[in-house]
Image (spheres, grey):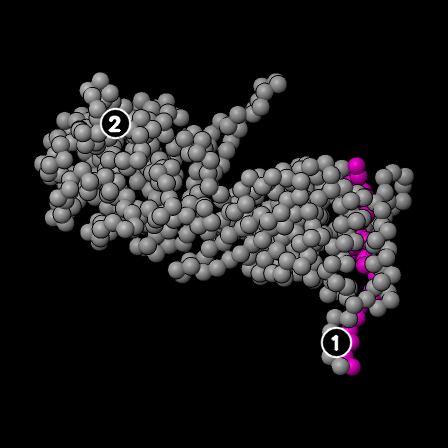
Amino acid sequence: MAKGKIPEEIFDFLNRDSGRSLLIRGPAGTGKTTLALETMDKTRRMMNTYYLTSRVADSALYDHFTWLKQMVEDGEMMKVVKEMEKLALKREAEKKGPRVERTELRKLEGYIEDGGEPLFEQGEITLAVGSPVEELDLVYDVVEKALPKSTLVVIDSVEGICEKYGITPAKLMYTLEKDLVESAHAKVLFIVETPEQLLDYLADGVVHLEMKIVNNRTLRTMEIRKLRGMRIRRSHYVYSLENGRFTAMATPDPDDVLSFNSFEEASAKPFSTEIENADRIIEGLGAKGVILNLFADEGTTVADQYLFLKKIIAGHLLAGKGVFYMPSKVLDLRENAKYFSCSKQCADRFRTHLRLLVLHTFIPSVSEREENLMLLEGTDVNREITREILKASIGIEPPYLFIFDADTLYSTYRNLGAVDIMNLIRLIRQTGSNCIFITYRGTTHETISQLSDVNLALKKIESVPVIAGEFPHTYYHGFSVEKYVSSPKSGSKPAPKEIKIKLMPIV
């Protein structure tokens, strides 16, 4: 079963001993319900969970969130309680034990019975609902039954419940905040449709979801605007609703990029972008002689490039393939080795199966040369990079993987022209090798783009790196970091055993 991911800040916020309220706001279709259900899934082992909805029936909910039904059937999550269970809860509540204060709820019931707020007023037309708040009463029963254990309650949506009972959203939120959050130390997630910030002051935390179309692609962004009593380390995320799961993606920590060490899948299929439509073209060419242009937009870093490149390089190394890499000038040559030191086999083959293509003037002295450097004179690329020279340098037969930073390539061979690029690409295709060119905005590398079979763009959106296909045109994809921790020894913290970074379409 696919798993989603919520921001660590939200998990930590709800995991505190005291009661907490979190308002999830955003227009229709942004994934507010998906985030709430994902939060329930991630917290269900720490507390009871209860979902009150005014939106859809169980069957419609299960159709959209196929993973949810299995969880309910397995008894892993508590959703809407049936009438028979309600009677049992009432009997339990009558027994001695911790009770949930219902002062504000009783005031609300009296308010509703007196007429409540008119839902529509057009001259002589007035509509008010004065029925007892049975659903809310049941929420209190659920929270009370679980005491002293905490309960996470989701109200989906605040406007829907208020419309049913003829009350204002502020009154409902205030009631639950006083009785459940402050008195019973419950956690309450309020889902609201209105984009205005009028209700933000009533909640301890506020999350805003946004969806827009950019270049015919769906882009989903999330902003954590308030978490009372907590420092927000990351406020902006991109997220995906793939397979009905909410997966938040932020800028990975530099240490995670360095420590990323899960390459098994990559070794079986080394030249894969993990972008479906792009991989179709690569597979259609037999994964041989493929030219891929990775356009790195303004604001992206070499570490962002490695989010995409590292698995491809590691896959070729583990498959015993030779790799020729001309890195960016801003990257210290020894830094390259750090990215592959997380895997012993990769670290060993980094020295034997990979050659860094470097202009000889970059190396101050012979004593500082690394054994895997291939020094270039910078005179004629087609004379310095030939099949014979490559084989002599690495001692491995083609096919190879080539990675050229275009700025470094053009500055190494200052008279490099379109014919030189075409001859270089011809060599790559003739040897059945594959090549990735990294190009940048503001430089003239149109020849590379035009000659490439696949063109991808690496961008920063809300400071988060994403990648998308320009040709073929694809969704935005974000980088999802998954950490698998080993069982800790007595008295020690659990340490990451495996770190995976995979691309996920933003849909």
Circle 2 is placed at which residue position?
A: 353
Mark linked to residue 121: 1
Q: Earlier in the sequence, mark 2 or mark 1?
A: 1
Q: Position of residue 17 (x, y in %)?
A: 72, 36
> Above or below — where is 483 with respect to 66?
above
Q: Is 147 situated left or right of 258 in this image?
A: right
Q: Is 305 situated left or right of 324 in this image?
A: right
- Which sits in the foreground, 23 or 494? 23
Q: Residue at x 27, y 35 (%)?
A: 329
Element under disc 1: strand
Q: Position of residue 464 (x, y in %)?
A: 45, 45
Q: Residue at x 74, y 58 (%)?
A: 170
Counting other residues with Cα less than 10 Å from the Cα at mark 2, is it few (<14), some (14-19), or many (20 or more)? Answer: many
Total of numbered circles in the picture? 2
Kind of residue indicated by mark 2: His
Q: Position of residue 222 (x, y in %)?
A: 54, 50
Please give the range of residues in magenta: 124-148
Residue 190 visible in the shown view: no
Kind of residue indicated by mark 1: Glu
**Was residue 54 drawn as part of the magenta stretch in this picture?**
no
Viewer-side label of 2, 1: 1
**Was residue 128 drawn as part of the magenta stretch in this picture?**
yes
Q: Are marks 2 and 1 in contact (CB under 8 Å)?
A: no
Element under disc 2: loop
- Which sits in the foreground, 369 or 390? 369
Residue 47 visible in the shown view: yes
Counting other residues with Cα less than 10 Å from the Cα at mark 1, is it few (<14), some (14-19), or many (20 or more)? Answer: few
- Which sits in the foreground, 138 or 293? 293
Mark linked to residue 268: none
Q: Is 100 situated left or right of 447 in this image?
A: right
